[in-house]
Image (tube, helix red, strand yellow):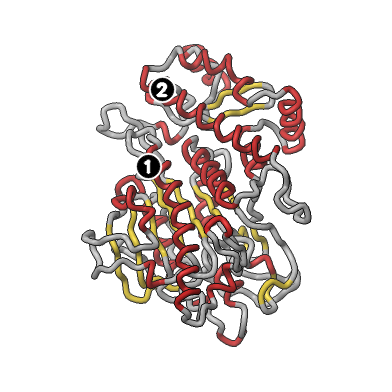
């Protein structure tokens, strides 16, 4: 909401529209952010920047561009990742990326990107820590297991510093792994480097949230954390949904909507309720391993955990609650097993496969499983209509990849990277882009350009823009 609009103008605009909302549905301790609706914009003085009319767009509203960075650990079997093509639009997805077939036209696979800041140099072991700690910073990290950590500002936070005031949350940091702030996790490197993608300053990581319930309450609860906790406990005792508290507001708003928007609102609220019910089911399930201190709200099933976090990210983008996010699907060095696909050995151990075909085949299975989780998310993004009539995926840039390339040898060149979404049509998608050796940070600068953000001349070890995207 524009802060320069006076309270008097706000009240007048609300009276004219007969609404008791400011892009939210409000109830006792509840603040349900809404997606944009064509029926309610751009008439309202209360419209957000995403509700501005497109010049010559016959009343259609402009949609903001969103940016997310999704990280998977330990590298990927590259022979199963890269398409068999010389590049361009005439390519077939590789075996590992087959789960993205339904959104192939919104995806570009990019080869040649590298993160040389993660190389060993004089520091010896610790490639997992360096891969995670430099992925979004492009800055060589300090080798320390103490409190004197030092990295760089991550690119998501660079963006958040410029556009974060336009949304409820400057950025959103999520993880499906543990949260560790201290200790030695990799050859003398602090755990902070492996368990944080986002860094607000070189010495201050932004701790990601692993708990879907906490993220849900942050998105839909009202007031400070203690008040949101109390409101949650009250709802749980009364066995009520958050939507029960905004029913009056919902009915009042529906009267001002056309049929398309009423259907869109119903679909959105149904999605919110379905996610809320999934979290409730998770909280009622017995802990899979009683020795593990997992807080309520974290599913024992890893795939369900990932999908809930993807759903939180989609809701945050759909409601314009934030426009920049990170999701650490698993931290570097993760040795999680994948019993759900019949693999009992740890992921990290398997990636040191010593070129043994049977072990490589298991790592490929894990790579494929991660791609399947991504595919589900991207399909939901593609099926969610944005305010301009395009899909939410069309108006986003979703970068997926790893700071390790070959997990067996710990290489950081020719990283497995793809970008889904076309940033509102400004990115060339549906292709395999082959570049020469190029800093990953060059891609970041071009992504900022596609968001319309000016003034970022360099980042980390960048050498220029990746103009070919």
| Picture residue at 64% right of the left edge, 25% below the top | 241
- Image quadrant assignment for residue 280: top right
Which type of secondary structure does the marked residue at label 2 adopt? helix
Q: Could you say which is closer to the camera, residue 190 or residue 98?
A: 98
Please name the residue that numbered disc 2 is placed on: 263
The numbered mark at residue 382 is 1
On screen, residue 325 versus residue 285, left or right, reads left
- Image quadrant assignment for residue 42: top left
Is 6 drawn above or below residue 329 in the view shown? above
The picture places residue 188, in percent across and down from the top left corner, at 70, 78
The picture places residue 439, in percent across and down from the top left corner, at 42, 72
- Image quadrant assignment for residue 414: bottom left
On screen, residue 279 versus residue 379, left or right, reads right
Q: Is residue 463 visible?
A: no
Q: Is residue 51 visible?
A: yes
State which quarter of the image contains the C terminus: bottom left
Residue furthest out toward the left: 90
| Picture residue at 62% right of the left edge, 78% below the top | 126
């Amino acid at each position: 909401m524009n802060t320069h609009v006076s309270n008097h103008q706000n009240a007048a605009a609300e009276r004219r529209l007969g609404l008791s909302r400011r892009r939210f549905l409000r109830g006792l301790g509840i603040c349900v952010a809404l997606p944009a609706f064509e029926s309610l914009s751009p008439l309202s003085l209360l419209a957000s920047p995403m509700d501005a009319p497109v010049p010559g767009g016959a009343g259609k509203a402009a949609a903001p561009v969103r940016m997310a960075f999704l990280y998977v650990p330990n590298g990927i079997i590259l022979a199963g990742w890269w398409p068999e093509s010389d590049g361009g639009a005439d390519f077939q997805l590789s075996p590992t990326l087959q789960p993205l077939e339904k959104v192939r036209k919104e995806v570009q696979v990019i080869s040649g990107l590298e993160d040389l800041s993660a190389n060993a140099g004089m520091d010896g072991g610790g490639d997992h820590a360096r891969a995670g700690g430099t992925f979004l910073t492009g800055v060589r990290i300090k080798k320390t297991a103490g409190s004197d950590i030092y990295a760089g500002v991550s690119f998501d936070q660079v963006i958040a510093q410029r556009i974060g005031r336009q949304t409820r949350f400057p950025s959103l940091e999520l993880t499906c792994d543990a949260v560790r702030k201290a200790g030695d996790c990799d050859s003398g490197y602090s755990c902070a480097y492996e368990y944080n993608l986002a860094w607000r300053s070189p010495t201050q990581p932004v701790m990601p949230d692993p708990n879907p319930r906490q993220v849900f309450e942050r998105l839909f609860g009202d007031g400070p954390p203690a008040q949101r906790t109390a409101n949650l406990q009250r709802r749980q005792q009364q066995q009520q949904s958050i939507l029960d508290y905004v029913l009056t507001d919902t009915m009042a708003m529906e009267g001002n909507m056309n049929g398309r928007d009423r259907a869109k609102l119903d679909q959105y609220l149904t999605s919110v309720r379905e996610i809320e019910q999934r979290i409730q089911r998770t909280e009622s399930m017995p802990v899979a391993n009683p020795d593990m201190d997992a807080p309520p709200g974290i599913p024992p099933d890893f795939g369900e955990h990932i999908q809930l976090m993807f759903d939180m990210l989609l809701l945050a983008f759909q409601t314009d609650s934030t426009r920049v996010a990170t999701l650490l699907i698993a931290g570097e060095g993760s040795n999680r097993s994948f019993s759900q696909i019949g693999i009992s050995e740890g992921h990290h151990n398997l990636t040191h496969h010593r070129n043994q075909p049977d072990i490589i085949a298991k790592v490929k299975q894990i790579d494929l499983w991660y791609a399947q989780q991504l595919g589900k998310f991207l399909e939901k993004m593609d099926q969610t209509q944005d305010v301009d009539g395009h899909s939410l995926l069309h108006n986003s840039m979703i970068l997926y990849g790893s700071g390790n390339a070959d997990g067996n040898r710990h290489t950081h060149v020719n990283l497995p990277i793809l970008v889904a979404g076309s940033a509102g049509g400004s990115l060339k998608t549906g292709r395999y882009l082959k570049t020469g050796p190029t800093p990953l940070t060059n891609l970041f600068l071009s992504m900022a350009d596609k968001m319309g953000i000016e003034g970022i001349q360099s980042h980390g070890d960048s050498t220029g823009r990746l103009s070919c995207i």
